[in-house]
Image (cartoon, rainbow, N blue to C red):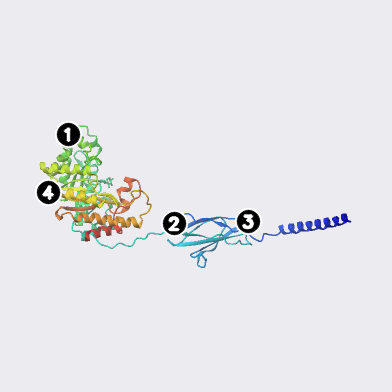
Amino acid sequence: MIKKHMYFIILILSTSIILLIISCSDDSSDEPTTLPAPILLEATAITTASFNISWIGSTVATQYLIDVATDDQFSTLLSNYNQFVITSESLQVTGLEDDTRYYVRLTASDGTITSEFSNMRSATTEFEFVPEPEPEVFLRDTAKFPVGVALQAGRLNGAYASRVSNEFSSITGEFEMKMSPIFQAEGSYNFTPGDALVSFAEANDMQVHGHALVWHNAVPSFVQNFSGSDEEFEQLIRTYIHDVVNHYKGKIISWDVVNEAFDDNGGNLRNSVFRQKLGDDYLAKCFQWAREADPDILLFYNDYNLFFDNSKLNAALAMVADFQQRGIPIDGFGFQAHIGINFPSETQIRSAVDKVVATGLQVHFSEVDIRINPNNDLTMPSSSRLQAQRAKYKEVVEIFSKIPKEQQFAITIWGLIDSQTWLIDFWGQPEWPLMFNNDLSPKPAHTGFAEGLME
Ligand code: XIL
């Protein structure tokens, strides 16, 4: 009896198992009714107008549909990204506004079934700095002293030339009036580019500052490797200075007679070929030779780091005191002023300037440029650094404006537009140290210069 019951139970159980198996296998022959939702990853490569998205999809999905909106409810979908169809598992979302937060989600599809939405991600595009146009104030019209720019004659064309003549009242040759381009061979000179600068200046009512008769970094090789006697070398340089000063006599106002004669950090006399062959008193000789050729030309000593390298400044001041005591001619002192937005400080600059003012010489801020990227952490100029640069230009101009009027020679900026600054090559990194953008529009730095003139 029990056995009979057992058979019956086993029969029922096995029948239901078979039915279950059949029903299961029936099911598995159908298409799936759902697709897994993709998993959207964090946006990457965010720019002012785009970002990249990627996601973990599913092997059965054949395409994905992307939504991008400016609200997290996806009620304001971008028209280009409203169920945007793509078959790969990443996408660059483009054509976006800067400084805007975007929301992204997507579904997967196999052509028939569409998955649930993925998780949502958001990304904020980068802020695109568009500078406000700076006010058009021409510096030469406002300044009570000459405002200069360092130039290459070959660039003086078109709008570039107009910007130069509108803004500036003084020109320095960026290299055309150095010894290496001029001095071709003994008795042979190339004055053509320097003469072009002089003609431009004459035509536009500007003065020209000569730079530089003697500089250890612009020595032609036949001078550097001179094989004659020291007396012959002295004759060579004396004649050079005579001839060049004489050529520009009456056409230019001043010369840097010797440039950068003192070493960094210690202020010793740099051991240039001039010192080696003309002796420790070569600076006095060069100044005297320049004076012999032109009794009216203003003679300058010019050097860098003098706002903060006190040993170099003291060496230069000692030279000036010595010249004045011995009656060696010297009229002016050039602070090159290659500086940065944070260094040297206003106090350092004022203190160095005061010491030079006390000599009675004319003061030239002769090669001004103000770095905003000394630590090489910028690939584009940022608004805050450009504003700091504006403040530093203003500070430099204010300091200069406080020099007694009769000792204000000029402020000269070392170049016109940022892309042409010598500092990019010199430091091997991006820099924007000047007052004009590459399209010749004025930067905040230019406004800073104009503000400095107002004080
Ligand atoms: C630089 C010029 O800007 C460059 O174009 C040139 O190749 C090298 O000289 N101190 C000076 C300037 O006195 O003559 C230098 O000018 C910059 C440093």
Q: Which residue is mark 3?
A: 60
Closer to the N terminus: mark 1 or mark 4? 1
What label does residue 232 carry, if any?
A: 1
Q: Residues within 10 Å of mark 4 (few under 14, many from 20)?
A: few
Residues 446 and 207: in front is: 446
- Return the disc, 1 or 3, that comes first in the chain's sequence: 3
For residue 429, side relative to residue 407 (left or right): right
Instruction: Give the percent coordinates (x, y) of residue 187.
Output: 18, 39
The answer to whether residue 42 is left or right of residue 162 is right
Earlier in the chain: of badge 4 and badge 3, it is 3
Quadrant in the picture for residue 145? bottom left
The vertical placement of 15 against 182, above or below, is below
Number of numbered discs: 4
Residues 165 and 129: in front is 129
Q: Amino acid at mark 4?
A: Asp
Q: Earlier in the sequence, mark 3 or mark 2?
A: 2
Q: Which residue is mark 2?
A: 47
In front: mark 1 or mark 4?
4
Residue 25 at what x, y percent from top left? 74, 57
Instruction: Name the residue located 16 percent from the left edge and 48 percent from the top edge.
Output: 332
Q: CA distance from mark 1 to mark 4?
A: 28 Å
**Front residue of this view, candidates 355 and 327:** 355
Specify the quadrant of the image occupied by residue 387.
Answer: bottom left
Question: Mark 2 packing: few (<14 Cα in 10 Å), some, or many (20+)?
Answer: some
Mark 1–mark 2 CB contact (< 8 Å): no
Residue denoted by label 4? 296
